[in-house]
Image (spheres, rainbow, N blue to C red):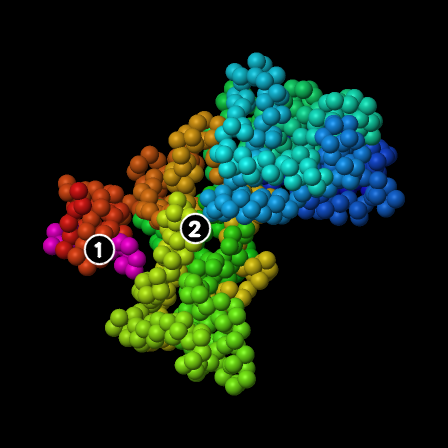
Amino acid sequence: MNETKSQNLNQNQLEAVFSKEKAIYLHAGAGTGKTTTLTRRILYLINDLNIKAENILAITFTNNAAQEMKERLKKNVDPKNFDNLTISTFHSLGYQILRKNISKLNLDLGNNLYIADESKSQSVIKDIIKKLNLDKERFKYSRLKKNFAKIKNNEVKKKILNELEQKMQNEEWFTPYDDYTYDNLSSEEKQIFNLYKEFLKKNNLLDFNDLLIYSYQLLQKDKSITSFYNEKFKYILIDEFQDIDLIQYNIIKLIGKNNFIFVVGDPNQNIYSFRGANILCNELFIRDFKAHKINLNFNYRSTQNILDKANLLIQNNHNPKDKSFQNVLKNNSFIGEPVIYKHFINENQEAEFISETIKKLISKHHYNYHDIIILYRMNQLYKHIENIFITKNIPYIAQNVTSLYQQTVVKDFVSYLKVLMDPNNDIDLKRIINVPSRKIGIKTINKLEQMANEKNISLFQAMQNLSDDDNIKPKINNFLNLFYDLQKIFSDENQCNLDNVIKLINEKINYSELLSQKTNNKDSNSQKDKIIDRLNNLQKIFSIENEEQKTGSFLEKLNILLNKISLSSNENQTEQSNKVLLSSIHKAKGLEFKIVFAIGWEQNIFFNSDENKKKNVEKEERRIAYVAITRAKELLYITSVKNRFLKGKHIINEPICFLKEMKLFSDNSFTNKNHKFNQYQTKKNNIYQDGDRVQHNKFGQGIVISATNDLLTISFKLPHKIKQILITHPSLTKIK
């Protein structure tokens, strides 16, 4: 061998690098060194077999992955040769195919072709919604774009699947056709879709779906173009093959005919069906190309205890008779700590456990915050973790979600509090002076600012000093009167405290009601629920802080909390440094951390609709859980919650069935040594049951989350939270 370094590769990796087989499927399990093997294979082709770089095509699924591969290869390939190497995504390849040949499809597009990236598509669709005077809350971009992509892709995929159906319908891998079409759209959505397509065509734009669809159609239609790419790319290598869709697979089938193809994938990590990824493509590749299969199952990432749980889980996705894609991960060097599973009554207990465990790991075991990730199936689950991290001063970054303190509703209320603490705070006063709307516009604010600058006083003082004949005085006086009323409430510690301050301000300024009315009548209730949900999350933080700060006046406690909020808000959310990462499981694919907290392992979280009961969906959810487990290197904590407050309502949950498959608990016993929920499992009474609604004279309505022989655990609406009350208490009645 020349530059291809064979040291540090195990036997299966070496077989993959040096194999003479024409088609190879490298089944690379999580943490088994797939990227190293793939790059060494390319080096072997160029440096040892003297294959011209211009005849090699390497495909990755993201531009970042393509760039990383280029950096790895650049060090070991002659610069002149390296420049001829094609490393691209499928979309980049599609553009390359279409750039000079799209006229052959007779699409009536100009010669200059442009790509509408995600931000451009979003901007166009949002502009269309605005021009049609439609409610942006009802017609959300993310849902529209997803449905538009389905319609475009399904027109092509339907033909492909129809050809396969007779051959594959009895096979385990066959996935029925998703028949979402143009007819499924509402009349307004059809308008948006048609105008979107018109805009793209008029401006010579292709979105990402078009790049794949049209390049596939072009290769099908024009054999000379297909032959050109057959000749050009004699060696094709594809990473993350489990995430491929049927259109991408058929592009490869056309340009890779009779060529050398090396693909790397792991069907156990196929978790992107919502983007069109089809696990069927893995089986098709083995059959269509008569591929030689090589397994990588020696894991360099995780302890054996973690791998054992991953293996126990994922084996349930495979037919015992079919060994084709089974891959048992092993690590012969380190057994490690047991996987810890905890079940809690509510999400507050879950968050408390996580924060306390992190504090211990940092202080006693010399871990860093950046060694830790919190993984969840639904983005909504990160909120209660974020709340406790703020009050416990645990640095964090939430990936691809808007931090609580970056949300408009929260910013508004924090500004109200800051102005009540200091009326001369011009920045925050300008934010809330017209929120909700008081008809105090930019001209009025500019006039007040000019007066303040001339007299060297604050904006608030300028408002107080307006002359009686000033035409803006009536509306300014309305605001000042409201402000003085709020100050009276604010200064009365018998009436106002951290447990209720957000609620009191909302009631006084009528924030949630007035802002929700800005949307149309159909969606105002939904908007109001969202505002209230965010205010409830903010109030939770205030309530936790009230418990944390045992001494001090209301204003002293509030000042400390507002400073904490300012510190959290001002941090650069893209700068990870030494912070705990909060992430959805999907966004964490490909990452690894020493410590993983996998939260929300409940049936209602992973399976949230009747649709999800289908066999193929259960398998995908199991793969998602598998991906979460295999992110962990040293320590893995899994949690579930019996009663969770989600989307404005209390949900009674059962732990997910996967925990039984992993032998973390058996049936309904909850007797695992690491499982502390059994302390709440005592004799039931005959009057109240879990989920019953109750009325309390002081605390109002609540829901029973645990009912024993003599004691009820009840979740009340904020600010009262969870209380334990004797079943015989005279203040308590059951709502029929």
- Could you tell whether 508 is left or right of 14 in the image? left
Callouts 2 and 1 close, C-beta under 8 Å: no
Q: Residue at x 34, y 39 (%)?
A: 654
> In this picture, which residue range is highlighted in magenta?
716-730
Magenta stretch, main secondary structure, is: loop
Whether residue 735 is visible to the viewer of this picture, yes or no, is yes
Task: Give the tally of numbered discs.
Answer: 2
Number of the front mark, 2 or 1: 2
Residue placed under numbered mark 1 in the picture: 700
Where does residue 623 sit, x and y in percent of width and height? Answer: 51, 35
**In this rendering, would 46 be left or right of 15?**
right
Numbered label attached to residue 519? 2
Q: CA distance from mark 2 to mark 1?
A: 30 Å
Image quadrant for the C terminus?
Answer: top left
The quadrant where residue 500 appears: bottom left
Above or below: residue 194 compared with residue 64: above
Among all residues in the image, which is located at the extreme right?
80
User: x%, y% of residue 272?
Assistant: 56, 36
* Residue at the limit of the structure toward the bottom, as seen here: 455
Quadrant of the drawing holding the N terminus: top right
Residue 554 percent location from the top left of the image: 33, 73
Task: Give the residue drawn at x 83%, y 30%.
Answer: 232
In the image, 451 versus 263, the foreground residue is 451
Mark 2: amino acid: Thr
Q: Secondary structure at mark 2?
A: loop
Q: Does the image show residue 259? A: no
Reply yes or no: does residue 372 show up in magenta: no
Q: Residue at x 25, y 48 (%)?
A: 703
